Amino acid sequence: MSSNLLYLSRKDVETAGSAMPEIIAALEHMFREKAAGRVEMPPKPTIHPRPGTFINAMPASIAAIEAAGVKWVSSYPMNRSRGLPLISGLLILNDVATGLPITVMDCGWITAKRTGAATAVAAKFLARPESEVAGVLGCGVQGRGNIEALACVLPLKRVYTYDTDSRSSESFAEDVRRRFGLEALPVEKPELAVKGCDVVVTAGPITTVPHATIKAGWLAAGAFASLVDYDSYWERAALHEVDKFCTDDIPQFEHHRSLGSLRDVPAVYAEVGELVAGIKPGRESREERTMTCNLGMALDDIAVAPIIYGRAIEKGLGIRLPL
């Protein structure tokens, strides 16, 4: 019996595509399954080949959609100066009936989209529904994905952009104006992308020791923040001003804490899946400061990859490779 797998390049994955609302819906369904205990995902093991870098192995399975696989993904912040992507890697899906791999695909596009979608799912339950003003600190791929997704679930009108590289902030603002039709203003000081904003996204490089740029008193009452870069951007006192601190997966959160990350952060109020499933209430008042520190789950990727694989088959994309 011969078998083969479908190799999908980054271009193939982008061409196969999936609209952001579909990705948000896929993640919301996954979070509901997670809350019901119908998924499997061990905490992701991590290696650090160079200082300030990491490579993660991220396996997961979702019984409801018969999906199982693993993502092997790296983060190399110094790649920006080399003209290379900060995030890169591959994703493998397996046939759940036979265990055979059926596809290997570039994971960059999926990682960007599903990370933004996870923020959007959390925002549906933690942000004020009338939120119009967002601030983004860290103007790379993840920041763009977050704004794209948030614009699908909130009536955003204005985005403030900040990056330590002012050129990145300016190009990000231009991209937001062009792609999403929102007012976008690059700012020179980080506090201008936090104070007065309804939503704040920090999406810079993940650092072992937080640089604590965001200070206490900056996050407005009633605001929602998404920590895409874990706690890297936040002063401890600023974190402890939050009324509800959530995450996507508590076991993974505690695993990172055991390794020395996420020190002196607020107690976790709920997993995002508990909010989606109605096990715990999300926002309960206009004045609450809410926050999610989504660590990035393999379940996110395994929820989206079958959609891409199916579209690639329909469109005749990719290269068949023998096993």
Image (cartoon, helix red, strand yellow):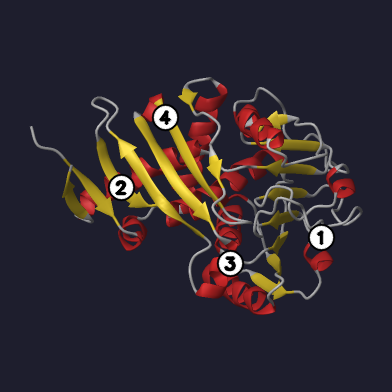
Q: Earlier in the sequence, mark 4 or mark 2?
A: 4
**Residue 99 picture location, percent across and down:** 27, 29
Point out which mark residue 104 bears.
2
**SS for dot 2:** strand
Instruction: Check residue 58 in the rendering and tell me which mark sits there, or answer none.
Output: none
Distance between the alpha carbons at the discs numbered 4 and 3: 32 Å
**Which residue is depicted at the point 47% across and 21% down?**
38
Callout 1 touching callout 3 (CB < 8 Å): no
**Residue 202 picture quarter:** bottom right
Q: Which residue is mark 4?
A: 61
The relative height of residue 99 versus residue 133 in the rendered view (above or below) is: above
Q: Is residue 10 above or below residue 56?
A: below
Label 3, on which residue?
78
Left or right, 144 with respect to 6, comes to: right
- The disc labelled 1 sits on which kind of residue? Thr
- Kindly identify the amino acid type of the residue bearing the numbered disc 2: Val
Residue with the mark numbered 1: 213
Mark 1 closeness class: few <14, some 14–19, many ≥20 residues within 10 Å: some
Q: Residue furthest left?
A: 1
Mark 2: give few (<14), some (14-19) or many (20+) Cα within 10 Å. many
How far apart in space, not on screen, are marks 1 and 3 (Cα)? 20 Å
User: Is residue 230 left or right of 40 when viewed as pictured?
Assistant: right
Closer to the camera in the image, 231 or 30: 231
**Distance CA(mark 1)–CA(mark 4):** 37 Å
- Quote the CA–CA distance across marks 4 and 2: 16 Å
Is label 3 or label 2 in front? 3
